[in-house]
Image: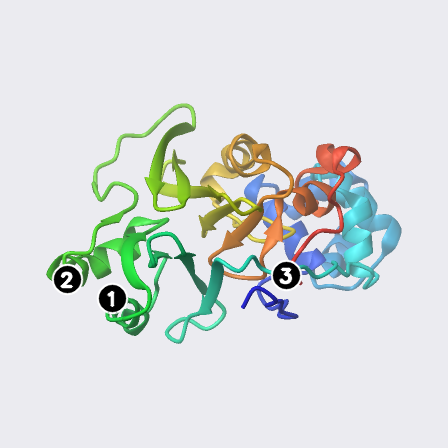
């Protein structure tokens, strides 16, 4: 298991999808983006369809505050990350219920227990509850939806679980809100980072006696892109800078969908954060 590495790129955005996300997030019409980039509307529409015009791509990327260099590398097919092996205490479990999505298991040699992160399938949850070798110690959810669905079963089996607030009437915040709490679980220390943007979510930054550290991000992030929250585009970028991208560069990012990656790789290769590219010393470190 410690040697696991995958070639699945189905969860990654293509270069033209990234352009579209940035345009939608910034609420720019085609006419406005055309004027800002000095690229005619016809060429812009072709770019968004995936038809490459290199000079136009760089101009549109600049107008959207994206890295034209990275997007051009993607478009040319030169975006080939280097593989890395997963640590022996981490297991990624693809979801049967939701193809392309991931749950995660942390195996604690000290307590002989497992910690589940974002179990999306009831059969996966029950399998680990009934596991004679590594019975589940606790379950962690990054968003409230899955936690609400699983709460009854977890309570029936007296399995502790945690995640974001289930309140339906959360107050709105003028500024992004981030709260942190550190938990000790066997040989793992887990920093629960609650984010409200305005929808509640939790990131779990985990470290142990064996490197590297991990961060479980749920649907908050995907490799070489972002997950679009249209009404909070700029807040999402700032929250990612303050949370995921502020972690040590060797930290493995474990998303709900798509390949695993690292903080260092994202700093060097994520077109939404061009300001980090020249600083990363882990630019080739990713799982694919």
Q: Which of marks 1 and 2 is nearer the N terminus?
A: 1
Q: Residue 129 carries which label?
A: 1
Q: Do the residues labelled 1 and 2 touch (CB within 8 Å)?
A: yes
Identify the residue at the far right of this view.
55
Q: Which of marks 3 and 2 is nearer the N terminus?
A: 3
Q: Position of residue 77 (x, y in %)?
A: 81, 64
Q: Distance between the residues labelled 1 and 3?
A: 27 Å
Q: Which mark is residue 157?
A: 2
Label 2 SS: loop
Residue under pointer 3: 85
Identify the residue at the far front of this view.
110
At a point 67% along the width and 55% down the height, the residue shown is: 286
Q: Where is residue 120 in the image (x, y as percent from the top left)?
A: 35, 65
Q: Nearer the viewer, residue 271 or 260?
A: 260
Q: Which of marks 1 and 3 is nearer the N terminus?
A: 3
Question: For this view, does 74 lie left or right of residue 168?
Answer: right
Label 3 SS: loop
At a point 60% along the width and 36% down the height, the residue shown is: 248
- Which quadrant does the N terminus fall into? bottom right
Q: Distance between the residues labelled 3 and 2?
A: 34 Å
Q: Position of residue 288 (x, y in %)?
A: 67, 63
At a point 62% along the width and 53% down the height, the residue shown is: 261
Q: Which colour scheme is used?
A: rainbow
Question: For this view, does 23 lie left or right of residue 37?
Answer: left
Marks counted in the figure total 3
Q: Position of residue 275 (x, y in %)?
A: 72, 32
């Amino acid at each position: 298991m410690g040697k696991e590495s995958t070639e699945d790129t189905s969860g990654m955005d293509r270069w033209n999808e990234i352009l579209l996300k940035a345009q939608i997030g910034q609420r720019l019409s085609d006419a406005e983006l055309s004027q800002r980039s000095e690229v005619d509307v016809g060429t812009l529409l072709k770019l968004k369809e995936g038809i490459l015009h290199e000079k136009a791509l760089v101009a549109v990327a600049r107008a959207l505050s994206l890295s034209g260099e990275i997007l051009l590398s993607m478009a040319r097919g030169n975006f080939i990350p280097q593989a890395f092996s997963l640590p022996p205490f981490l297991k990624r479990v693809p979801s049967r219920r939701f193809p392309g999505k991931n749950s995660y298991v942390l195996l604690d040699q000290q307590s002989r227990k497992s910690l589940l992160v974002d179990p999306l399938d009831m059969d996966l949850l029950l399998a680990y509850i009934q596991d004679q070798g590594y019975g589940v110690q606790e379950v962690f959810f990054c968003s409230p939806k899955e936690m609400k669905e699983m709460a009854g079963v977890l309570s029936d089996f007296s399995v502790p679980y945690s995640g974001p607030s289930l309140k339906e009437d959360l107050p709105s915040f003028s500024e992004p809100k981030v709260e942190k709490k550190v938990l000790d679980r066997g040989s793992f220390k887990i920093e629960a980072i609650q984010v409200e943007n305005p929808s509640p979510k939790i990131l779990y930054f985990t470290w142990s006696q064996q490197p590297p550290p991990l961060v479980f991000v749920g649907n908050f992030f995907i490799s070489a892109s972002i997950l679009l929250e249209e009404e909070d585009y700029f807040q999402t970028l700032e929250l990612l800078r303050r949370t995921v991208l502020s972690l040590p560069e060797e930290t493995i990012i474990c998303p709900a969908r798509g390949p695993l990656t690292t903080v260092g790789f994202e700093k060097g290769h994520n077109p939404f954060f061009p300001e980090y590219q020249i600083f990363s010393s882990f630019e080739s470190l990713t799982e694919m």
